[in-house]
Amino acid sequence: MPVAGATDDKFEKPFAMIAEIEAGQEAMRSGQGKMKIRMEQEKEEIRNLIRSEKEGMEAHVDCQVEVIKLEDHVNRYIEEVEDIKGFKKEIEEFQGRISDMEKKVRGQTEKFPHQFINHKS
């Protein structure tokens, strides 16, 4: 009959190996859980980064829209100033023609004063 202690020694090594395997599997599960948590954290960080970049881009686009609106306003103002300058030049030219006509009329009245005096008939 075999000795009971010898049989126990025979199974002790496989049981120890099974225990090591189970401990390794538990460590892997724990590591996978930690890795999954870290991956979720990194996904959230990436989402936040994307959200932040998107908001930054939207703010930049909004700023560019405001710049374009301002440039449009300035261009319209410049056009109005140029129109006013053009009108001013036309008025000055018209005033010059009126002045020339006044000079001609004065010249005519000086040449022919009797024609411009009211005669009672």
Image: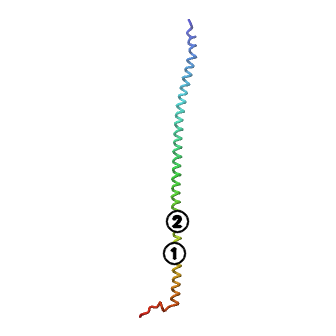
Q: Quadrant of the N terminus?
A: top right
Q: Measured from the top left, where is residue 79 in percent x and y? A: 52, 65
Q: Measured from the top left, where is residue 71 in percent x and y? A: 53, 60
| Residue displayed at 53% across by 81% down | 100
Q: Is residue 58 above or below residue 70?
A: above
Give the residue pinned by disc 1. Answer: 91
Q: Is residue 59 above or below residue 77?
A: above
The crowd level at tag 2 (other Cα within 10 Å; few <14, some 14-19, many 20+) is: few
Amino acid carrying label 2: it is Glu
| Residue displayed at 53% across by 41% down | 46
**Is 119 displayed left or right of 24 in the figure?**
left
Splitting the image into 4 quarters, where does residue 35 fall? top right
Image disc number at residue 79: 2
Q: Measured from the top left, where is residue 29 in percent x and y? A: 53, 28
Q: Tell which circle, 2 or 1, labels the residue nearer the N-terminal end.
A: 2
| Residue displayed at 51% across by 64% down | 77
